[in-house]
Image (cartoon, rainbow, N blue to C red):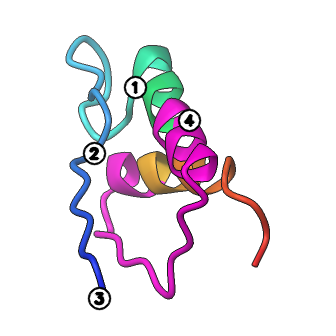
Amino acid sequence: MPHLYLVRHAQPDFTGHYDSVTALGLQQSAWLGQHFAARGQRFARVACGSLQRQVSTLDAAVARLPEA
């Protein structure tokens, strides 16, 4: 049975450029990717918004997943 995972962007930088994520936000995104990898989670496709904070969140998480 297919599953749909919805992930909100990582912690934005409230003190600087709002459309970026903090170092903690990038680390949290990496942890999410590691969590999915540890569970053996595979994704047929991913979708992402066009805001930089959304793209950065996806990139950090996907970088921790094994290659297809």
Identity of the residue furthest to the right in this view: 67
Q: Secondary structure at mark 4?
A: helix
Q: Earlier in the sequence, mark 4 or mark 3?
A: 3
Q: Earlier in the sequence, mark 3 or mark 1?
A: 3
> Which mark is nearer the camera, 2 or 4?
4
Instruction: Check if mark 2's residue and mark 3's residue have beta carbons within 8 Å.
Output: no
Q: CA distance from mark 4 to mark 1?
A: 9 Å
Which residue matches tag 2? Answer: 9
- The amino acid sitting under disc 2 is His
Q: Amino acid at mark 1?
A: Gly
Query: How many callouts does the rendering have?
Result: 4
Q: Residue at x 56, y 72 (%)?
A: 42
Q: Earlier in the sequence, mark 2 or mark 4?
A: 2
Q: CA distance from mark 4 to mark 3?
A: 26 Å
* Quadrant hosting residue 3: bottom left
Residue 50 sits above or below residue 61 on the image = below
Q: In the rendered image of this protein, does residue 45 appear above or below residue 21?
A: below
Where is residue 53 shown, x and y percent of the image?
A: 35, 46
**Other-residue count near label 1 (Cα within 10 Å), few / some / many at <14 / 14–19 / ≥20:** many
* Residues rendered magenta in the picture: 30-55
